[in-house]
Image: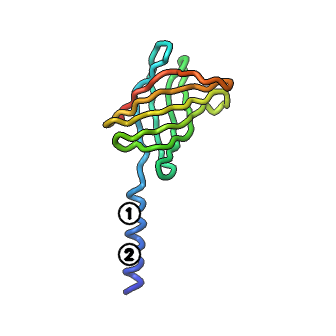
Amino acid sequence: MRRTILTLAILALLLTALAARPAAQTFSGSYDWSDGGSDELSAEFRPDGEDRWKVTFRFKWNGKDHSWKGEATGSLSEDGTVSGTVDSGMGRRVWSFEAQLSGETLTGKHTEVTGGKKYETGTFSLAR
């Protein structure tokens, strides 16, 4: 009987821990280039520890679909902030970003590092 109660208590703790784990969060909207122009953008944040995320940004650029992946830290809860970097997977460009969540909208700025030089490239606004 004690063994059964202990087993049920451990199972309840494990289920509670799994339920408390944050789910992947998806946003979509647009990004605006500093030098003009705008395109659609989506982002998926997958939990990778406390306030740590694996990130995938999907967008069209020069008529082609792109998927840039990387990591971020911060909170995606109400009024949280998050920042991180993603890259094209080809090693030539890195895109860093900083964003603030207000209600259900994530707004931020992006900067590209190419050839060791940093360029302010624009802003984005994404809704959950």
Counting from the top left corner in percent of width and height, residue 124 is at 43, 26
Q: Position of residue 24 (x, y in %)?
A: 43, 45
* Distance from Cα at disc 1 to Cα at disc 2: 12 Å
| In the image, farthest residue toward the top | 36
Dot 2: few (<14), some (14–19), or many (≥20) neighbours within 10 Å? few
- Say what amino acid the circle numbered 2 marks: Leu
Mark 1 neighbour density, 10 Å: few (under 14) some (14–19) many (20 or more) = few
Quadrant where the C terminus is found in the figure: top left
For the residue labelled by badge 1, is the local secondary structure a helix, a strand or a loop?
Answer: helix
Q: Residue at x 42, y 66 (%)?
A: 14
Q: Earlier in the sequence, mark 1 or mark 2?
A: 2
90 to the left or right of 100: right
Q: Secondary structure at mark 2?
A: helix
Residue at point 60%, 24% (across, down) = 118
List x then y, in percent, for residue 44: 46, 38
Q: In the image, which disc is placed on residue 64?
A: none
Amino acid type indicated by mark 1: Thr
Look at the picture and state if 63 lies above or below 82.
above
Q: How many marks?
A: 2
Q: For mark 2, what is the residue?
A: 8
Looking at the rendered image, the disc whose residue lies closer to the viewer, 1 or 2, is: 1
Residue found at x 49% / y 17%: 34
* Quarter of the figure that contains the N terminus: bottom left
Mark 1 and mark 2 in contact? Answer it, CB < 8 Å. Answer: no
The extreme left residue here reads: 103
Labelled disc at residue 16: 1
Give 104 or 67, whichever is nearer the viewer. Answer: 104
